[in-house]
Structure formats: structure tokens, C-alpha cells
Image (cartoon, rainbow, N blue to C red):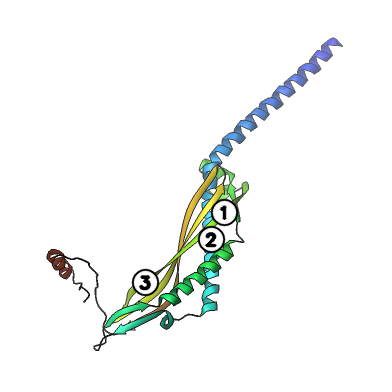
Amino acid sequence: MIQKRRNIRLRISRILIFILTISLILSAFTVYLDFRLRAVVKVFAKSAVKTVVTNCANKASLKALGELGVDYSEIAKISRNEAGLATSVEIDSATANMVKSHITNEIAKQLESHEKVNFSVPVFAAFGIYYTALKWPRLNYTVHITTTVVSDFKSSFQGAGINQVLHQIMLTVGLESDIAVLGGNTEQLTTTSFIIAETVIVGAVPEAFTSVGHATDEVMEDIFDFGASLPQ
């Protein structure tokens, strides 16, 4: 009877030791996995946030431009000389600022509803394995973001044929996101551009133009060597 009790106690002890060992192994693996996942989660978080803020900016800009209905003639004026040479393109600053303000505000309004971004990370990605067949299991995460919108106008001139230049007025939007992610905060800048208005300038146009202040004779010679001309 005593021997039987000893055997039972021995079996219970072995089971407890086995359970404890497995628990320690699982705990160690969990800590190691968490350590490996921290860097991977940050990469996936940045990608997810970039997708969300870019989509918001695209939708907001399309909505704002549809509401404004601004065409090229309202935002820019082309000046020509008697020979038909396009001497300058003047941007209406009041109209440009109104367009920029409206689009920027619409983008910020859209981003207010995306303060949280959900995404998932394959567990095997923690070990550098990204094969399609090993995308499961996945861990779900949620990050909190705050995004600041900074915008500015840019012009683009492209050749569109003989004596033709395509002029595009573009709004470049910088989306500065502060991401609260596992392991600490991180920042990300996402940039996207929208065509506000465009037109084809037909007729003779300057092949090159530069503006130089306080130019010396040596600098003047270099400018003419490159085929550009000083403004009068």
C-alpha cells in the first residue's frame, strides 16, 4: 500500500515537472517571439498607415476638386509677346490659396475618422519567412495615429509636341504621421501629389530660363554656354 502511494506521488511529481517544463519553454518562446515581432510589427504598421492616409488623401482631394470645379484659366494666366512667345505664367495666389486650404481641410477631416489602423502580421515573418504558404497563423494589431497635413503647389512643364508644352499645376501633400506602435512611437512621412489644373501652351516657348541675382561676368558666360537666358 505504501509502495503504491509512493508510485502515485512519483507520477504526480513527474507530471508537475513536465507541465512546469512545458510552461517555461512556452514562456521563453513567447518572450523571444515578442522580441522578434517588435521590429516586424513596426514595418507592417508603417505600410498599413501609409495605405490608409494615402487613400484618405486621394478620396478627399477628389471630393474637394469636384466641389470647387476650378479650371486652369481661374488659377493661372499666360502672358505672351507680339510674336506669340509665352513670356510668363502667373499664378493667382488668392485662388491657389483657396484651393489649397479647401483640399487640406478636407483631407484633415477624412483623417479624423482613421485615428486607429488595424492590420495583421504573419507569425513566421518574425523569423524572416514570407512564403505565401506560411502566411498563417497571423497576429492582429491596432495602432493609434495622429497625422498632420502639409501642402504646397508645384508646377511641371513637359514637352507635348513641336512648340507645345504641357503645364501642370500640382498640389503636393505631405502627411506626417505619428504612430503609437509596439515598442514605442515612430514617425512616417507620406507624400502624394494631385493635378489641380493643366493646359497645353501652344506657340513658341522658351527652351530654357533661369533667374540669377548678382551675377558676375564669369557666371554670365556660363549661363549662355548652357543656352539659358537672363530675365530682362
User: Are dots 2 and 1 in contact, CB under 8 Å?
Assistant: yes
Q: Is residue 88 left or right of residue 64?
A: left
Residue farthest to the right? 1
Task: State the CA–CA distance, disc 3 to disc 1.
Answer: 31 Å
Q: Is residue 129 visible?
A: no
Foreground mark, 2 or 1? 1
* 118 versus 160 height, above or below: above
Q: Is residue 229 left or right of residue 101?
A: left
Q: What is the number of the mark on residue 221?
A: none
Identify the amino acid type marked 3. Ser
Q: Residues within 10 Å of mark 2 (few under 14, many from 20)?
A: many
Task: State the CA–CA distance, disc 2 to disc 1.
Answer: 10 Å
Identify the amino acid type marked 2. Val
Q: Earlier in the sequence, mark 3 or mark 1?
A: 1
Residue under numbered circle 2: 53
At 36% from the left and 82% from the top, the residue drawn is 77
Identify the amino acid type marked 1. Ile
Could you say which is closer to the camera, residue 214 or residue 3?
214
Q: Which SS class for mark 1?
A: strand
At 45% from the left and 72% from the top, the residue drawn is 97
- Position of the C terminus, as image quadrant, is bottom left
Position of residue 124 measured from the top left corner of the image (x, y, whole percent): 56, 43
Residue under numbered circle 3: 155
At 53% from the left and 73% from the top, the residue drawn is 62
Foreground mark, 3 or 2? 3
Q: Which SS class for mark 3?
A: strand
Position of residue 103 measured from the top left corner of the image (x, y, whole percent): 51, 70
Residue under numbered circle 1: 145
